[in-house]
Amino acid sequence: MTILSRIDSPDDLKNLTTAEIKILAGEVRGEIMRVVAQNGGHLAPNLGTVELTLALHSVFASPKDKIIWDVGHQAYAHKILTGRREVFATLRQQGGISGFPKPSESPHDVFATGHSSTSISAALGLAKARDLAGEKHQIIAVIGDGSMTGGLAYEGLTQAAQLRTDLIVVLNDNQMSISKNVGAIARYLQDLRMDPRLHRLAEDIEERIRRIPAFGEFTAQTMEKIKDGLKYLVIPGVFFEELGWSYYGPVNGHNIALMQRAFREAAARGGLVLIHALTKKGYGYPPAERRPQHYHAVAPFSLETGRALTPRTPASYTDVFGQALVELAKEDDRVVAITAAMPEGTGLTRFAKRFPTRFFDVGIAEAHAVTMAAGMAAGGLRPVVAVYSTFLQRAYDQILHDVCLQNLPVIFALDRAGLVGRDGPTHHGLFDLAFLRHIPGISIMAPQDERELRRMLRTALAAGLPVAIRYPRASGLGRQLEENAQVLPWGRAELLRNGYDVALLALGTMVPLAEAAADRLSDQGISCAVVNARFVKPLDEEMILDLAHRTKMMITLEEHSITCGFGSAVLELLAAKGLTGVHTKVMGLPDQFIEQGSRAALLEQYGLSVAGICRAVAELHPVRVSG
């Protein structure tokens, strides 16, 4: 029997010896590797936090003591140790456990996470709730060095210093987030890592200062000034101490005994304590240690070879975007690219290598990325902000106030728009049309395939306006790419097939499904017009109104929430023109947070499939239509 098989809750760790916990660390690491190799998921960050997690749960008493995991993509060991060992094999599967902390899943998941830099603010809120209730328990936030590049983390740190409550922050410093960390804070943390002996030296100097007896004019106040001056020279963590935090570290995050000691001392000390733990991303699996970026988030793969198990597919939209942007930058030296800590994920690594002085990784700081882009545009450049749809939500005010109000030519390349699969509700990009469409001055496009994505990039650059282009986390359709992409007619949809019974107005990824449904319906005597909408804003009003008059029946299709999206825009147009007699159905994702699952399964579940479209036509058309 393994030690892991006996662990059903954190309480079961309390009676283990240090040697047994070390053995358990290997068993937990093996279970994470086995399940992630089968299901896919965040491998390297979770391998790096196994010992840290064991130390946390062996010292503190979850769920009474509350642990908040920033982002949450390093919490797999936490899930295994908190009663989910037997269901861990369902990780990220439809109906299974989430890849991120989820309060509805376990009382040990006290706060839902999925986006970065939120843990300190959330932990501070929980701490004040504890204080006002007169309760006594520990609040611990675990935040990575990558998340510490986000401004929200510092808002939490400074507010905590003002409120002065008991709070522990564990800085999990693995020297690498998804991509190489950037900025002054990253350099500061690197300096702290270089020589952990500095902390011991600092303690020794302070102790010697305290032992010198005061005499004459050499007052205690003078001593304090001297001590403060020496702190700036020798004490790692002085930045945090000046913010009002007691700093411990750096500590080897893979040494369970050292981490346990640090946690016990922090709890005994009280107040605001920051523990700086050094860990290695991918620890214990050599391929992930060598290539932590590659193994940050993986599809199913072979543990023996480290190679993905998925078959070769056409180039992804992400790759096509990256190549197209390089080509545009060759033609126009005003083109610059900006990412928020995701050069690999957004396809910008090729651009960064080809144009290093025109590439900017701002760290996990989406709001700053957008306003910086606005400044660049005001200075005559043509910035392209490449960002996941779900992360652009963090920069709404900057889009509205800094870009669109000034009508600045910033292009937003929205990767992972629509369903993203097993990362679930924190990462689905289902709301970008809703929070962008109502902003005056912005234009929005969505390509039906990778060839059209290239055309839309060139079109957006030529427009000289704020433009957003949304595209999916998916492989392309294998279309032959043009050597020189053409500029699309502005605001014009494409009529792919004429028809007289029903008009299928499809956006982006829904276009191929609409065409396939029209083929099936044609066999049943239903004549369908199929439109590749291309533009959500401005709409091609002329084409939509013409089809409305001719067919009297319309179905809009989008991989987006049905609330405030493309279909809503069409309904607003019909209402404004007084076309109340047109039977219209909006097809998209329902007004709810969508669970995890494969993209294909979720599309089928919510009716965004050929059969689902045929069923929708049957509801509108008097002729019987079979799915």
Image: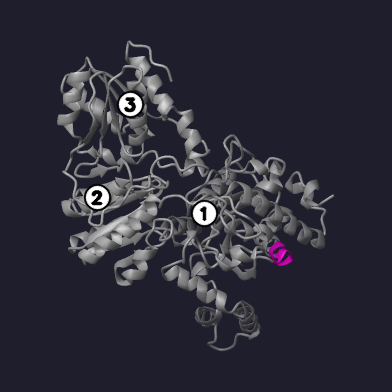
Q: Circle 2 — which element?
A: helix
Q: Quadrant of residue 484?
A: bottom left
Q: Is residue 200 above or below residue 151?
A: below
Sequence-wise first label, 3 or 1: 1
338 w.r.t. 427: above or below: below
The magenta region covers: 255-261
Horizontal and vertical percent position of residue 374:
24, 57
The C terminus lies in quadrant = top left
Separation of marks 2 and 1 at Cα, in angstroms: 43 Å
Find out whether the residues at labels 2 and 3 contact each other: C-beta distance under 8 Å. no
Q: Which mark is residue 381?
A: none
Q: Label 3, label 1: how many angstroms apart (C-alpha)?
A: 52 Å
Question: Where is residue 457 drawn, in percent x and y?
Answer: 25, 52
Would residue 510 be counted in the magenta stretch?
no
Q: What secondary structure do most residues of the magenta stretch adopt?
A: helix
Q: Is residue 537 above or below residue 376?
A: above
Q: Which residue is mark 3?
A: 518
Q: Which residue is mark 2?
A: 455
How dense is the environment of label 2, judged by Cα within 10 Å: few (below 14), some, or many (20 and up)?
Answer: some
Q: Which residue is mark 1?
A: 120
Image spot of residue 250 (x, y percent) = 60, 71
Q: Residue at horizontal 51%, vertical 36%?
A: 595
